[in-house]
């Protein structure tokens, strides 16, 4: 076995890959995804794409919910050597948006197929049973597969709207982003919801 380390820069995604692969002939196209290994990738967002504070994040979102990851779908293979995983979220409370929603689907770049993992460095992948405050916007990409009857939304600011709630009811806000959002890490969820209520008041 040998280790092959490659760097891919495709569109707005820079990918650093470490994959254990059998020896291969020069010019041979390796299968993708491979049977095992880990890819670490980061996304280079355009200027101004990510909101810098809670009021801006709330204003940029058409839906804000408190919910739990109820289902993770097997990742699909995207072009440019990457995976994308759908998470179905069971909604506990709608903080902004349609009050009739019970479940939604959101996608995250990255995931695991078999023993191969495509892992983001900017944020964490959602896990089954985890609780989140999610800031969401319209999913504009066409032709994505429909998951059950849960409508699709996109995380606001790529991953800026991904606020996990731990078992102690405190926010886990640990991603590559502005200090105006990271400062909520460790805050009680009740305090965050209070600040959010002020931010979305008409």
Image (tube, rainbow, N blue to C red):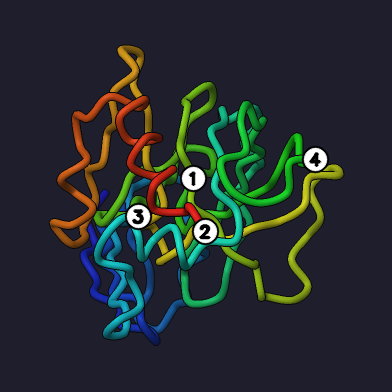
| Mark closer to the chain start, 4 or 2 | 4
Comes first in the chain, label 3 or label 2: 3
Please rate how many residues cluster around mark 4, counting C-alpha atoms within 10 Å: few if below 14, some from 14 to 19, many from 20: few
Residue drawn at 40 percent across, 84 percent down: 27
Q: Is residue 200 above or below residue 16?
A: above
Provide the residue designation for mark 1. 134
* Residue 20 visible in this rendered orientation of the protein: no
Q: CA distance from mark 4 to mark 2?
A: 21 Å
Question: Which is more toward the observer, 96 or 160?
Answer: 96
The residue where tag 3 is placed is 21
User: Could you tell which of marks 1 and 3 lies nearer the N-terminus?
Assistant: 3
Of badges 1 and 2, nearer the viewer stands 2
At x 61% / y 31%, what residue is drawn?
93
Q: Which residue is at the front of the view, 193 or 149?
A: 193
Vertically, is 7 above or below 161? below
Q: CA distance from mark 4 to mark 1?
A: 16 Å
Q: Which type of secondary structure does the marked residue at label 1 adopt?
A: strand
Where is residue 33 drawn, in percent x and y?
A: 51, 58
Pointer 2: residues within 10 angstroms few (<14), some, or many (20+)?
few
Per the rendering, the mark at residue 202 is: 2
């Amino acid at each position: 076995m040998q280790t092959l380390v490659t760097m891919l820069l495709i569109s707005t995604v820079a990918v650093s890959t470490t994959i254990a692969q059998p020896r291969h002939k020069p010019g041979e196209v390796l299968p993708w995804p491979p049977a095992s290994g880990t890819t670490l990738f980061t996304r280079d967002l355009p200027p101004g794409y990510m909101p810098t504070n809670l009021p801006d994040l709330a204003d940029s979102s058409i839906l804000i919910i408190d919910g739990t990851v109820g289902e993770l779908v097997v990742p699909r293979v995207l072009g440019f050597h990457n995976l994308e995983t759908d998470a179905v979220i069971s909604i506990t409370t709608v903080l902004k948006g349609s009050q009739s929603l019970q479940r939604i689907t959101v996608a995250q770049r990255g995931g695991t197929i078999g023993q191969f993992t495509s892992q983001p460095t900017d944020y964490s992948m959602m896990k089954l049973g985890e609780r989140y405050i999610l800031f969401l916007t319209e999913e504009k990409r066409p032709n994505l597969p429909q998951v059950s009857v849960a409508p699709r939304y996109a995380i606001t600011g790529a991953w800026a709207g991904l606020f996990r709630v731990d078992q102690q009811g405190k926010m886990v806000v640990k991603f590559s982003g502005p200090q105006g959002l990271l400062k909520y890490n460790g805050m009680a969820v009740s305090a965050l919801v209070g600040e959010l209520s002020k931010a979305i008041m008409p």
